[in-house]
Amino acid sequence: MMARSFTTSAAVTMARKRPAAVQDIIRTRVPGLDSTSIHNLSEIHPLLDHYPRTTDQEGALNLDTAKLWASNPPLDDMLKSQGDDEIDEASLPHGLTQQDLRRFLKRTLIVKRTSNMTTAGKIPSMYALVIVGNGNGIAGYGEGKDDEVARAVRKATNRAMRNLVAFDRYDDRTIFHDIDHKFHATKIQFRSRPPGFGNRCNHYIHEICSCIGILDISAKVWGSRNPMNVIKATFEALSSKQKLPEDIARGRGKRVVDVQHTYYGASE
Amino acid sequence: MPRHYDLCARVQNGFRARLPRIAVPDTKMNLAIANVLYREGFIAGVARGDHVEPDAEYVPTTPDNVATRRLWLDLKYNNDEPVLKRMSAVSKPSKKIVMKVEELQNLASGNRSQFIKGLQPGEIAILTTTFGILELREALAKGAGGEVLCRAI
């Protein structure tokens, strides 16, 4: 079989029409831009090669150059929401800044349609409960109500940023000891678990644990499983009901030694 | 004769009421359990006295004053919180709990044993053994099992 070279019809057409001296006929869009000037594009127009090629001592190409223009991130004013419930940086706890808050995990856990019965009739309103957290010991929850879901969620998020709480964790992964807590009709039992266990618990508690940074926990909700109350009970229990071994030892006048870390090595 | 559950109730109620000291019946078992609590740091001191206050000097127990004899326990508070939050009986007249060394080791590791929950960080268990009334870890050091009287945290 004869070996054929396959070319597109357009290329074949051009090849037929091309005269002998191509360089004399081809007009470049930018004067001076042809195959010989490829290495000096920046001389023709500064925009063409905006990473000027510098050479280091050995004459090799060095692309490590400074930016030619300054980066202008959007101003905080532009990023602020329409006007309700702004967060004052001075009121943020634990030395957090607006920059840190932007990187927080935000989870909208509950969106409900509520209605207020008045003489004029039923006035509907949207309710949202949002939890925020940095995944490393700081989290909070907020509730917001508005006519639109998006605005209610935004209000709730801002309130959550204002109500941040620091949580104690053993080994940065679980709680120090088992906790039993009752909030209204919701009873929750939390159990500390070894590394690699995971968060085996109610789905709302699971989201809260991922925002706090708890990696191993077991929990059971007894009684009412009302979502709002489960979330509030969890925040109350984990923030207030933990007793640190150092505080227990100080109260009793004893020295506390972490056997797990000293003798068996810290769990990575 | 008041048993260990009477002492558990008195001590827990005393801490909840934020009393500086409480008077409990003067018996050998109460004295032994109070000594364990003192060694573990739950109470500040144990003293014998009458129903009004501890004795300044030693007063021997005679048939005349035996009815007034009390043990006074000084309760401890730290950071506006009681040092002892809860003291509850484990072995009760309705169900006596006697454990072997392996079961006590389970309890000490935080695992359940004989339907009794394991010990949490900072929790102690007081048991009566052939070596006397000891805390759980002291009993394990001696290799002794026995009736688990109460637990305190």
Image: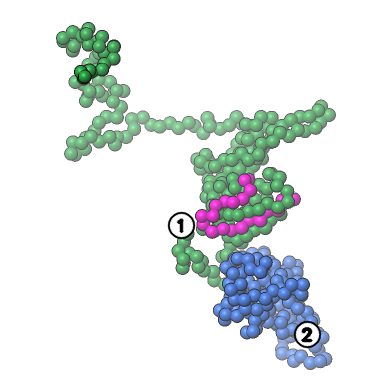
Chain colours: A green, B blue
Q: Nearer the viewer, residue B101 or A85?
A: B101
| Residue beneath the point at 61% across and 72% down | B103
- Residue B125's x, y, as percent? 64, 73
Q: Which residues are magenta?
A: A184-204
* Left or right: A167 in relation to A180: left
The local secondary structure at tag 1 comes to loop
Return the mark for residue A268: 1
* Left or right: B17 in relation to A131: right
Mark 2 crowd level (few <14, some 14–19, many ≥20, 10 Å Cα): many
Return the mark for residue A63: none
Question: Which amino acid, by three-letter code, is at mark 1?
Answer: Glu
Q: Are marks 1 and 2 in contact (CB under 8 Å)?
A: no
- Residue B24's x, y, as percent? 76, 78
Indicate whether B113 appears above or below A18. Answer: below
Observer able to see residue B74? no
Return the mark for residue B69: 2
Observer able to see residue A105? yes
Question: Which amino acid, by three-letter code, is at mark 2?
Answer: Arg
The local secondary structure at tag 2 comes to loop
Q: Nearer the viewer, residue A263 or A146?
A: A263
Q: Is residue A203 magenta?
A: yes
* Left or right: B7 in relation to A80: right
